[in-house]
Amino acid sequence: MILSKLADTLIGSEIVSLGNQINDRIRQGEKIYNFTIGDFDPRIFPIPRELEEEIINAYRNHQTNYPPADGVAELRSAVCGFLDTYHGLKYEANEVLIAAGGRPLIYCIFRVIVDPGDKVIYAVPSWNNNHYVHMNNGVHCTLEALPEHNFMPTAEQIAPHLDGATLLCLCSPQNPTGTTLQKEDLERICDLVIAENAKRGTGKKLYVLYDQIYSVLTYGEIRHYDPVSLRPEMRDYTVFVDGISKAFSATGLRLGWSFGPATIIAKMKAILSHLGAWSPMAEQKATAVYLKKTPEINAYLANFKLEVEERLRRIYDGFMVLRKMGYKVDAITPQAAIYLTIQLDLTGQRKPDGAVLETQADVTSYILGEAKIAVVPFYAFGASRDSTWYRLSVGTCIKEEIDNMLSNLKNALDGLKND
């Protein structure tokens, strides 16, 4: 069967595939601590009660027809108010586009900005940038982010590759690492973009896709920063991706928004009108009401963040105990989102049956088989195949099971022997 080159070369999401395999095993009765998918168990993390009520009211009021292609006016206005309240960003309704989550928006950004053969800069590990570049026939410019920088790209890494680039993809807080771009680091990156665009004159500019879907989920002293707040000149070159999916544990409601230069947003709207990837009318109407309930949002976020952070820190602390005991594991201090970056540096060790863990895939399989712990290796996010680092997602984590999970991990580590 002869199909398109895209059909012949595109692969599905490695993370979704792994998660489906784990869920199949769980359905068959196997006890697995599943930390793979960046989603929430609604029994543990339900959406805000007020948002749920507004959705029910919207359906009862028969809000089930097509929404406008750019989103209902009252929602776009409410998003503007939300951005001002929580980020100090001032945008107008015609600079906001609503869609069925972040994915169609990211696709539209690529389609509007990237021509075949255009260079796209992104760091790995990162979520799905490699696939979006491939789908749009862009040229991959991949930077390997390092643990000493919390797996975030640096200005020094980006600078040599700016010439001829069309799009720079940044995500903070980042999926898969749960780490953030610090103020000084983002400022330096913005200064590079501004200087590069000044050199280009009337030619095609370098744009930044800034994914801040986890922006309200930061912990401790960590703050979220964005290009436009730090450097107002970046307003002409930055297209944001945001939404309710992670902020309100509302992944299944499929409601995201982009905001940025009005001309780019208008072109994205045109593409989206052909895709039909709109957020449902009822969810849009409900969210328009909910985003104005600032006291209720603050109360929800306070509890939600407390619960997520407790899980992240307890697991992090458990890894630090194991590390101090001499096991070859590590973790990066939790900063944001629902992810913990962990390390399982176990290749070369022998399993109880004498077989050697020769590859990182062997390590992943061993931890799943012996400890019943499912985590996603960074190579699923574009990092090198021998990376010893993993994403651990706590969106479905039951607090009462954390100690048992860590005990299982210790027992599995005890079963390994060094040559």
Image (tube, rainbow, N blue to C red):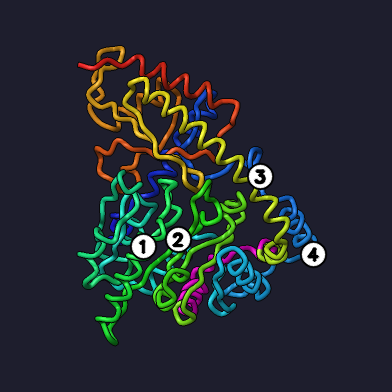
**Residue 294: in magenta span:** no
Q: CA distance from mark 4 to mark 1?
A: 40 Å
Circle 1: residue type: Cys
Q: Position of residue 3 (x, y in %)?
A: 31, 59
Q: Is residue 113 above or below residue 216?
A: below
Tell me which numbered mark, 4 or 3, is placed earlier along the sequence: 4
Q: How many marks?
A: 4
Q: Is residue 9 above or below residue 161?
A: above
Viewer-proximal residue among 232 and 274: 232
| Quarter occupied by residue 81 | bottom right
Q: Position of residue 379 (x, y in %)?
A: 31, 42
Secondary structure under tag 3 reads: helix
Circle 4: residue type: Asn
Secondary structure under tag 1 reads: strand
Q: CA distance from mark 3 to mark 2?
A: 24 Å
Tell me which numbered mark, 4 or 1, is placed earlier along the sequence: 4
Front disc: 4 or 3 = 3
Tell me which numbered mark, 1 or 3, is placed earlier along the sequence: 1
Residue 3 visible: no
Q: Which residue is mark 4?
A: 61
Viewer-proximal residue among 105 and 207: 207
Q: How would you classify the magenta stretch by its main secondary structure?
A: helix
Q: Marks 1 and 2: in contact by CB < 8 Å?
A: yes
Q: Position of residue 262 (x, y in %)?
A: 49, 80
Q: Marks 1 and 4: in contact by CB < 8 Å?
A: no
What residue span does the magenta drawing correspond to? 265-283
Q: CA distance from mark 4 to mark 3?
A: 31 Å
Q: Position of residue 136 (x, y in %)?
A: 33, 66
Front disc: 2 or 4 = 2
Q: Which residue is mark 3?
A: 303
Circle 2: residue type: Asp
Q: Which residue is mark 2?
A: 211
